[in-house]
């Protein structure tokens, strides 16, 4: 315990616990994982909030994310610069949102961001195609992809603008039975 | 300066109110970033601002307050940003005048600030700014000005990380001058801040911002909480605040402790990442079950077993706690112990061991009462827990009522399991997602295809008949075996073979092993969709298990009744013998003072004690089930895996990819097994208090063993079993089983007389007499009277009636809600359809128009004579229609326009005239000239 305490001050830990869904132990473990990613970059002492970021390439190689077809998007959506470089705050944020305790509304917001490949706040056909191709490893024919995207938009698009706004997306995802059980990562 | 440009873009697009917000937002963000002393690259800043703006649009509930706060942050932002601001002013020369004015005002201030800062010391400038802020309050719209002032102070402190004495003294003066209303407002604000702290984790903001906001809110609360209570209430308030703080801290520590106590988190995570969430759901269910059983065990052990061990009579003191002389030779044999005979039978594990003494030990612990209440309480607690879990699950899962509505969307956005962390599983998942998409596409393309419906119907009926035969057969088999085992029980145990002794358990386990695959094979005939097939399969296995269990129970009841008869005979015989002994003794010694008959407890005559027999049956069932499960895993999974793995080197085909392959984890079978075992535990726990402890051990080993087995020798599912909301489905089954296992126990408690010489209720007429006895003897008299009144039929009938009425009322209310829900859904659907229709109509009208247009030139090109007539007809027809439609909506106006443009190419003006004369809009007629008019009509969508 003694040497663990020096990573964060108690206030920091309390603040993190207020801002995330993690317990004290989990935050320390997260820091361990974060440190593991880039031992030469990340200091062990976080009491004075050092400014360091771990690049995308290292983060997506975590076993939790490695097999995820959307890993790059996940990391990018949570990074402040949009390039996928995560500071420890953003790193904690990411796993907090993806944790089991996070409410559906919060998860929906970030899911929307993740599936929004071209960052225009709409899921347009292009985004859907990318999503589908990532999901199926591009095994569907272009016609099939076209059909599925058409159908998806037809199903979920409420305002008829041929793309899914967040309202459409939320309405759809709030009724999905599997969303909560699948959209979480245990760290 | 990319960020500023971004701001400009937003500002130009929106009106003044929003404008101020947007700039200020970026300002406060700037401040936040400065505080974290990270000056980041410009490109990054732009990104962040984009996202922050998004965020701001999203959280509208917070908006007003934040707006206010942002406004307050304005001054120091501008003085810090003043150089940038100046540049900005230069940049946006050509801006809306209102915007400019606002900006200039601010820039002036910031320039002033700057000047002051240069001139005077820090504190002085602070003072100045204070004044300025006071002045500025006029601009800021708000109610509680003092509040804002003080908050501003705080902001400033936050911003500059300095606590100048001047400002703090001012704060105090502020506080002193607060009126009642202000205090109320401040209180409200503090409450709001507290709420913000509590819900901060649910906000979709960047962590940095959250941390900053948290700090601000906390400081604010800390600062003003103390100032709130005045005079009398101050101390109390301070105490309350302190206690809340302590409570929060304690809660957090407790929370931390609780999560640290949840076992097997890593193990489950490992399984999860290999097999996806569906297999893990079984292990989570197992863990949940373990927790439940642990609590049940706590009750049973703490309230029944432990008191008896500590305070009851020791082993060998009375007949029920002693192995009879005839059995003593073999009582320690392993084979006997393994069948729960010998010392096991006369141990703490079973009902018969417990004494019927009303109170035991120095504590006067009422063991019989405790036994009964614990036995019933276990059911009550389990019911409560299961129902509570079900309710929570129901809240969590989406309503999912309209399954067909979002097939593709759900597949698209929720089919990937984020838990997967194993390449093989990921590949399987990709494959299964692709297949499911293809299936859906096929479904979509040909919704209804039925070839030879008669054949399929026939096959389905045939399959159901076969399965019913199987179920009936298995039920009869069990009944037959149990009957036979009763005959065996009457015979000499030594002459029986092992098989004959364990026939019942063996047959039941065998049926459980053989029937499900058999059902699956038969279900092939039916050719259902896999999801429906799975439901049928689960239902059938459930029916099988249930049928078997109940047949077993009925057979057991027969046995119990037989035992009761023999017991009665024995009792009469014993009583007669004692009577004889007394009579003989008194006649022989000629005295009425008969000393009690002293018999060695091992030699005493004893009844069959049906309760212990029932308990033993259940324990044996559980144990044999455990053996079968473990053996199946060991042989079926592990043996198979080893064979496949090592024989593959010298085999003629690929075993791993080919026929035997590795086993998959059978989720539904395992879950159902778990549920039924739990049912048996519930049923048996009353007659064998040790059963719960045994079950805890079983679940513990099963957790480790199955975790190991699944990781070592199973492969991920090829067709990943979609366990959508199955959690509640399983819970529902569990509830049903709980209810069904409650019935026989309650029936026996209420109707059957307990054995006369064993167990805590011996000597009573019925088991529940213990409760009556306690009420009449130990409780004060008025309680007894109350109880008599309460059990009066005159009172019970109205109570039941009332309950029925309440149920009826609640039912009606829920129906009403359902109806309302349905209506809302319908409304939403209608709105959506309307939207769609409008869109489609646009298309369709366009299409019709296009067709018409295409029609026109083609015909006009080919035969010249018809060219004259056709347009003529069309025009007249259309014209007449258009006049009819004219007063209609805008869409019809489009038609008119189109028609006009159609009419235009016609050279004969007079023919086109009538529609105009009858009121066609002349502008449209005039406007489009032949060439461009047609082009426009075709190209532009109708104006609505």
Image (cartoon, helix red, strand yellow):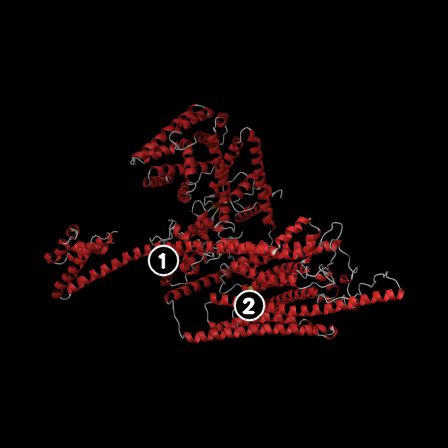
Q: Position of residue B430 (x, y in %)?
A: 46, 61
**Chain holding disc 1:** A
Q: Which residue is located at x 88 percent, y 66 percent?
A: B588
Q: Residue B776, which numbered label?
A: none
Task: Between residue B123 and residue B191, name the one nearer to us.
Answer: B191
Q: Residue at x 55, y 28 (%)?
A: B231
Q: Is residue B666 left or right of residue A133?
A: right
Disc 2 from disc 1: Cα separation: 42 Å
Residue A83, percent from left and from top: 43, 47
| Residue labelled with disc 2 | B543
For disc 1, the marked residue is A154
Q: Let me know if residue B612 appears in the view.
A: yes
Q: Height in image: B26 above or below A109?
A: above
Q: In the visual, does B407 lie left or right of A46?
A: left
Q: Chain of mark 2?
A: B
Q: Quadrant of the N terminus of chain A?
A: top right
Quarter location, residue A176: bottom left
Measured along the vertical axis of the image, is residue B565 above or below residue B927? below
B565 vs A66, left or right, is right
Q: Are marks 2 and 1 on the same chain?
A: no
Task: Answer whether residue B639 is visible to the viewer in this image.
Answer: no
Mark 2 or 1: the one toward you: 2
Q: Position of residue B6 (x, y in %)?
A: 36, 41
Secondary element type, mark 1: helix
Element at label 2: helix
Which residue occupies the foreground of this view, A174 or B373? B373
Q: Is residue B772 above or below residue B26?
A: below
Q: Residues within 10 Å of mark 1 (few under 14, many from 20)?
A: some
């Amino acid at each position: 315990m003694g040497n663990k305490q020096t990573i964060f001050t108690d206030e920091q830990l309390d603040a993190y616990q207020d801002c995330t869904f993690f317990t004290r132990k989990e935050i320390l473990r997260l820091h361990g994982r974060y440190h593991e990613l880039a031992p030469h970059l990340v200091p062990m002492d976080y009491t004075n909030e050092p400014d360091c970021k771990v690049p995308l390439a290292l983060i997506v190689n975590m076993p939790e994310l490695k097999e995820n077809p959307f890993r790059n998007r996940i990391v990018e959506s949570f990074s402040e610069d949009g390039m996928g470089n995560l500071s420890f705050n953003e790193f904690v944020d990411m796993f907090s949102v993806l944790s089991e305790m996070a409410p559906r509304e919060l998860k929906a917001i970030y899911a929307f961001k993740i599936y929004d490949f071209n960052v225009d706040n709409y899921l347009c056909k292009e985004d859907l195609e990318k999503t589908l191709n990532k999901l199926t490893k591009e095994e569907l024919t272009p016609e099939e992809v076209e059909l599925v995207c058409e159908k998806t938009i037809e199903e979920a698009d409420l305002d008829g603008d041929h793309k899914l706004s967040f309202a459409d997306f939320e309405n759809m995802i709030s009724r999905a039975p599997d969303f909560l059980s699948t959209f979480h990562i245990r760290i | 300066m990319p960020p500023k440009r971004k701001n400009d873009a937003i500002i130009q697009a929106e009106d003044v109110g929003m404008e101020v917000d947007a700039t200020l937002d970026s300002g406060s963000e700037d401040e936040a970033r400065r505080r974290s002393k990270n000056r980041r690259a410009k490109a990054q800043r732009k990104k962040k601002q984009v996202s922050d703006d998004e965020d701001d649009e999203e959280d509208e509930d917070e908006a007003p307050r934040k707006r206010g706060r942002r406004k307050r942050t304005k001054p120091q932002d501008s003085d810090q940003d003043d150089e940038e601001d100046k540049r900005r002013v230069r940049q946006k020369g050509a801006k809306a005048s209102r915007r400019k004015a606002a900006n200039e005002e601010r820039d002036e201030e910031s320039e002033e600030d700057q000047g002051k800062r240069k001139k005077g010391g820090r504190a002085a400038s602070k003072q100045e700014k204070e004044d300025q802020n006071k002045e500025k309050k006029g601009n800021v719209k708000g109610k509680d000005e003092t509040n804002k002032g003080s908050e501003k102070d705080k902001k400033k402190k936050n911003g500059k990380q300095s606590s100048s004495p001047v400002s703090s003294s001012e704060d105090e003066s502020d506080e002193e001058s607060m009126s009642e209303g202000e205090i109320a407002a401040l209180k409200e604000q503090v409450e709001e801040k507290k709420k913000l702290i509590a819900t901060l984790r649910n906000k979709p903001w960047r962590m940095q911002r959250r941390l900053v906001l948290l700090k601000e809110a906390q400081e604010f609360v800390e600062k003003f909480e103390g100032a709130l209570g005045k005079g009398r209430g101050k101390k109390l308030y301070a105490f309350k605040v302190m206690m809340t703080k302590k409570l929060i801290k304690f809660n957090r520590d407790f929370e931390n402790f609780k999560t640290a106590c949840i076992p097997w988190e890593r193990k489950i995570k490992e399984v999860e990442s290999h097999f996806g969430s569906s297999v893990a759901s079984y292990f989570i269910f197992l863990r949940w079950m373990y927790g439940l059983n642990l609590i049940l065990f706590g009750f049973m052990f703490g309230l029944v077993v432990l008191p008896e061990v500590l305070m009851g009579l020791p082993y060998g003191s009375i007949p029920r706690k002693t192995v009879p002389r005839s059995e003593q030779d073999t009582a320690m044999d392993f084979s006997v112990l393994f069948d729960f005979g010998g010392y096991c039978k006369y141990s703490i594990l079973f009902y018969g061991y417990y004494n019927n003494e009303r109170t035991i030990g120095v504590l006067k612990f009422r063991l019989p009462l405790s036994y009964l209440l614990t036995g019933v309480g276990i059911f009550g607690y389990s019911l409560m827990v299961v129902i509570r879990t079900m309710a929570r699950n129901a809240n969590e899962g989406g309503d999912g009522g309209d399954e067909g509505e979002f097939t593709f969307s759900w597949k698209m956005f929720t089919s990937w399991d984020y838990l997967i962390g194993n390449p093989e599983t990921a590949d399987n998942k990709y494959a299964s997602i692709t297949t499911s998409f293809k299936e859906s596409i096929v479904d979509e393309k040909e919704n209804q295809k039925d070839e030879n419906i008669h054949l399929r119907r026939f096959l389905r009926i045939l399959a159901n008949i076969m399965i019913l035969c199987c179920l009936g057969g298995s039920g009869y088999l069990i009944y037959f075996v149990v009957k036979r085992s009763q005959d065996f029980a009457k015979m000499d145990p030594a002459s029986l073979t092992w098989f004959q002794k364990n026939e019942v358990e063996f047959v039941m386990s065998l049926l459980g092993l053989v029937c499900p695959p058999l059902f699956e094979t038969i279900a092939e005939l039916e050719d259902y969709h896999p999801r429906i097939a799975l439901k049928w399969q689960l239902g059938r296995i459930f029916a099988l298990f249930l049928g078997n269990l109940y047949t077993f129970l009925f057979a057991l009841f027969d046995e119990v009744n037989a035992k009761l008869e023999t017991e009665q005979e024995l009792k009469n015989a014993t009583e007669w013998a004692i009577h004889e002994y007394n009579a003989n003794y008194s006649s022989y010694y000629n005295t009425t003072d008969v000393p009690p008959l002293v018999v060695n407890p091992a030699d005493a005559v004893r009844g069959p004690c049906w309760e212990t027999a029932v308990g033993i049956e259940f324990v044996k069932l559980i144990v044999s089930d455990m053996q079968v499960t473990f053996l199946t895993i060991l042989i079926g999974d592990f043996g198979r895996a080893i064979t496949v793995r090592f024989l593959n080197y010298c085999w003629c085909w690929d075993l791993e990819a080919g026929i035997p392959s590795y086993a998959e984890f059978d989720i539904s079978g395992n879950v159902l097994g778990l549920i039924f075992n739990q049912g048996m535990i519930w049923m048996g726990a009353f007659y064998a208090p040790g059963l719960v402890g045994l079950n805890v051990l079983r679940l513990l080993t099963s957790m480790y063993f199955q975790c190991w087995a699944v990781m070592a020798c199973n492969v991920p599912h090829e067709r990943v079993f979609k366990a959508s909301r199955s959690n509640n489905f399983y819970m529902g089954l569990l509830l049903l089983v709980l209810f069904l296992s409650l019935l026989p126990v309650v029936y026996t408690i209420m109707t059957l007389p307990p054995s006369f010489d064993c167990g805590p209720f011996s000597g009573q007429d019925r088991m529940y007499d213990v409760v009556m006895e306690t009420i009449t003897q130990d409780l004060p008299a008025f309680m007894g009277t109350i109880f008599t009144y309460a059990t009066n039929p005159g009172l019970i009938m109205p109570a039941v009636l009332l309950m029925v009425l309440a149920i009826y009322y609640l039912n009606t209310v829920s129906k009403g809600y359902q109806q309302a829900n349905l209506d809302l859904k319908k409304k939403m659907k209608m709105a959506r359809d309307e939207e769609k229709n409008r869109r489609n109509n646009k298309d369709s009208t366009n299409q019709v128009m296009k067709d018409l247009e295409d029609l026109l030139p083609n015909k006009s090109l080919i035969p010249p004579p018809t060219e004259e007539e056709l347009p003529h007809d069309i025009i007249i027809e259309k014209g007449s229609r258009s006049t009819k439609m004219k007063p209609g909506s805008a869409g019809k106006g489009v038609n008119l326009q189109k028609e006009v443009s159609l009419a235009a190419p016609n050279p004969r003006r007079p023919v086109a005239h009538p529609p105009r004369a009858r009121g066609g809009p002349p502008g449209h007629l005039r406007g489009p000239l032949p060439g461009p008019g047609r082009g426009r009509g075709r190209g532009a969508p109708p104006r609505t």
